[in-house]
Image (cartoon, rainbow, N blue to C red):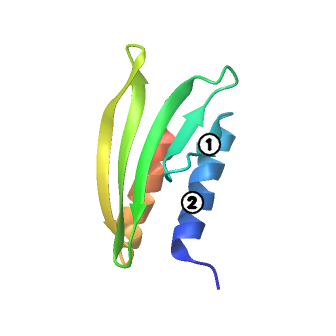
Amino acid sequence: MENIADVLSNRIERIFQEKGLRPCLTPDGKILVMDDDFTTRYKLDIAFNNNDFSCIVLGRRDNSLRDAKNFNVPWTSGKDIREFLEYLASMD
């Protein structure tokens, strides 16, 4: 049986790969999403625990990363998980 955090992480990776971007995991567990020029387009500060996960999404604007959206999603809410993933998929 797969761990739910691993399932979510794999889905996040696929979303960005489909956009032609490369998601990379930092040593402290953050996700940097880079383009082919190694420019960080997005940063996801994601934290998993037993009941939910939280994620601060930073996006590139005006040559710096800025707060785009914050999420706190319970594992038991399929609707909230889908909305989180749909938000990531909709980002430019």
The image position of residue 39, as x and y in percent, is 58, 22
Q: Quadrant of the N terminus?
A: bottom right
User: Please, which residue is most extreme toward the top here?
Assistant: 62
Mark 1 = which residue? 23
Looking at the image, is 10 positioned above or below residue 3? Answer: above
Of mark 2 and mark 1, the one earlier in the sequence is 2
Q: Cβ–Cβ below 8 Å for labels 2 and 1?
A: no
**Near-viewer residue (51 or 81):** 51
Looking at the image, is 48 positioned above or below residue 69? Answer: below
Looking at the image, is 34 positioned above or below residue 84? Answer: above
Q: In the visual, does 59 lie left or right of 68?
A: right
Rate crowding at label 1 as few (under 14), some (14 to 19) or many (20 or more) other CA atoms within 10 Å. many
Type of amino acid at the residue the image marks with label 1: Pro
The image position of residue 11, as x and y in percent, is 60, 58
Q: In the visual, does 48 lie left or right of 10?
A: left
Type of amino acid at the residue the image marks with label 2: Ser
User: Please, which residue is most extreme toward the front here?
Assistant: 27
Q: Quadrant of residue 44?
A: top left
Mark 2 = which residue? 9
Q: Residue at coordinates 62% horizontally, 43% vertically from top-left?
A: 24
Q: Is residue 28 visible?
A: yes
Looking at the image, is 13 positioned above or below residue 82? Answer: above
The image position of residue 83, as x and y in percent, is 39, 56
Q: Quadrant of residue 57?
A: top left
Q: Residue at coordinates 34% horizontally, 77% vertically from top-left?
A: 51
Q: Is residue 87 visible?
A: no
User: Please, which residue is most extreme toward the bottom here?
Assistant: 1
Q: Residue at coordinates 54% horizontally, 28% vertically from top-left?
A: 40
